[in-house]
Structure formats: structure tokens, C-alpha cells
Image (cartoon, rainbow, N blue to C red):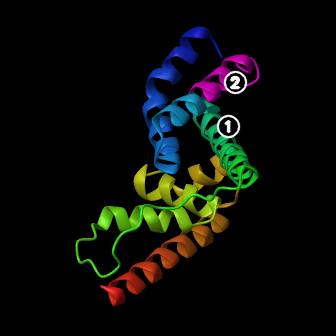
Amino acid sequence: MTTQEYNKAVLSLSHRLYGYVFKSLRDEDDANDIVQDAFMKLWQHRESVEVEKAKSWLFTTAHNALINFVKKHNRMQSIEGSTYLEPSENSNSTNFELKEIIDKCLKTLPEIQKSILLLRDMEGYSYEEIGEMLNLNESQVKVYLFRARQKIKDQIKDISNII
């Protein structure tokens, strides 16, 4: 990969890569750090990465960094002895916004399901592209996506019964 091809990859992929990471973390600084690290690693491995596979390579790298970050963050919280609590809301309130409900549902998904759901439904990648990014076959992507959507539907049904 030449310097010009690398720069083109940065320009064309940075926004989508940031969007994917940010939707998982909901923190601008952490998302920027992970995206910057992914591009730094691409630069370091530019000799071995084919231009056609740069997108897949970047998303795979960012996904792995995202998983490592979440694991590290969870360990740090448990070591500190504090647990992360969502801001409490009155469960009898009818002022739930759908976006807030979906965000809370997304947080309950396993990381792989969450990543696949975001890549497919929010970023618009094909099953094949997601499989390449996450080192899964197409049928595994479909199964994980189905399970993620089903879990969110079930959670939304439960919430609608409460309201």
C-alpha cells in the first residue's frame, strides 16, 4: 500500500469507522482513540495489507480493539469496586424515547451481536463484508444478527408491557 492509497483509505473510511466505534462506546474520546490506533496499525502494516482489503482490515482491527477496550474497562470497574449504573428513570413514566430504549437494549447484547447489528443495520454492510471484518462465515453473521434482533424485540415487548 502506497502513501497515496493509505491517505485515500483514511479519507474514505475514517467517518464510517468512527461511526461504528462510537455507536458501540458512546464516548467521543475513546472512539477517536480506537480509530486513530486502527489507522496507525494500518500504516505500520501497510506493506502487508492489500489495498482492496484495507476496509476489512481496518474494521477487524477496530472491532478487536473495541472488544479489548470493553474488557479492560469492565475489569477496571470491577477492580475499583464500583458498578456502572444507568441513570435511573421512573419505570411508570410514559415519556420513554425509543432511541433511549434501543440504546439500553443494545448495551445488553453480547459484543459480537452488537457489532454485527450495528454494522448491518446502522452502517449498511453486507453479510459477506461483516463476515470478512469479524472473521465469521456468512451463516454465522445471519444467526448472530437474528438473535440480536430477536433479543431487542423481546426487550421492547417487555418494556411496552410495563408502560
Helix, strand or loop for disc 2: helix
Which percent across, then down, holds residue 25?
Answer: 52, 47
The residue under label 2 is which amino acid type?
A: Lys
Work out whether residue 25 or residue 117 is closer to the camera in this orientation and state it: 25
State left or right for residue 117 relative to residue 103: right
Distance CA(mark 2)–CA(mark 1): 8 Å
* Magenta stretch, overall SS: helix
Which percent across, then down, holds residue 9?
Answer: 52, 23
Helix, strand or loop for disc 1: helix
State left or right for residue 62 relative to residue 106: right
Tell me the quarter of the image containing the N terminus: top right
- Identity of the residue drawn at 60% across and 40% down: 59
Disc 1 target residue: 61
The dot on residue 70 is none
- Identity of the residue drawn at 44% across and 41% down: 19
From this view, report whether residue 101 is shown above or below residue 63.
Answer: below
From this view, report whether residue 156 is shown above or below residue 32.
Answer: below
Q: Residue furthest bottom?
A: 161
Disc 2 target residue: 41
Quick check: is 71 in the magenta stretch? no
Q: Does the CB distance between marks 2 and 1 fall below 8 Å?
A: yes
Work out whether residue 50 or residue 64 is closer to the camera in this orientation and state it: 64
State left or right for residue 29 relative to residue 37: left
Which percent across, then down, holds residue 149?
Answer: 48, 73
- Report the magenta residues as a range: 36-51
How many labels were placed on the picture? 2
Callout 1: few (<14), some (14-19), or many (20+) C-alpha neighbours within 10 Å?
Answer: many
Callout 2: few (<14), some (14-19), or many (20+) C-alpha neighbours within 10 Å?
Answer: some
Q: Residue furthest top?
A: 3
Which percent across, then down, holds residue 4?
Answer: 54, 10
* Mark 2 or mark 1: whose residue is earlier in sequence: 2
Q: Quadrant of residue 89?
A: bottom left
